[in-house]
Amino acid sequence: MIVTKHHLYTIPGFSVRRGFCRDGARRWFAAHGLDWRAFVTNGIDSEALSATGDGLALALVAWARECTSRGPRDG
């Protein structure tokens, strides 16, 4: 499954507003050796995010799965 920037910017529950911030996400991608520009353009395979073992990445993958399973609506 491909996780997209839409998922990144709409994930609920981590602050007052929905989504993770772009600057923090960009730094997170760099710290994990992942290509931010490729992600923004094409998304990233959920396996690559899961492989980091990071709780935020795992939450993002779960959110993308939820969005995919329920179809286009909020997320």
Image (cartoon, grey):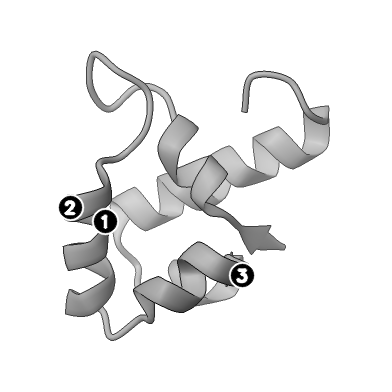
Instruction: Indicate which disc, 3 or 2, sits on the residue closer to the N terminus.
Output: 2
Q: Which residue is mark 2?
A: 24
Q: Position of residue 22 (x, y in %)?
A: 27, 49
Q: Quadrant of the C terminus?
A: top right
Residue 7 appears left or right of 72? left
Q: Earlier in the sequence, mark 1 or mark 3?
A: 1
Tell me which amino acid carries mark 1.
Ala
Disc 3 marks which amino acid?
Asn
Whole-number angstrom distance, CA of label 3 to CA of label 2: 19 Å
The spot of residue 33 in percent (x, y) is 28, 86
Are the two marked residues, 1 and 2, in contact with CB atoms closer than 8 angstroms?
yes
**Tag 3–tag 2 contact (CB < 8 Å):** no
The crowding category of the residue bearing disc 1, from other C-alpha atoms within 10 Å (few below 14, some 14 to 19, many at least 20), is: some
Residue 34, percent from left and from top = 35, 81
Answer few, some or many: residues within 10 Å of disc 3's Cα (few below 14, many 20 plus, some between 14 and 19). few
In which quadrant is the N terminus drawn?
bottom right
Q: Residue at x 43, y 53 (%)?
A: 58
In this rendering, is residue 58 above or below 44?
above
Whole-angstrom CA distance, mark 1 to mark 3, is 16 Å
Whether residue 51 is visible:
no
Query: What residue sits right under mark 1 in the picture?
Result: 25
Q: Position of residue 39 (x, y in %)?
A: 49, 69
Tag 1, which secondary structure?
Answer: helix
Give residue 42's mark. Answer: 3
Residue that protrudes farthest toward the bottom in the picture: 33
| 27 relative to 20 in the view: left or right | left
Q: Quadrant of residue 6?
A: top right
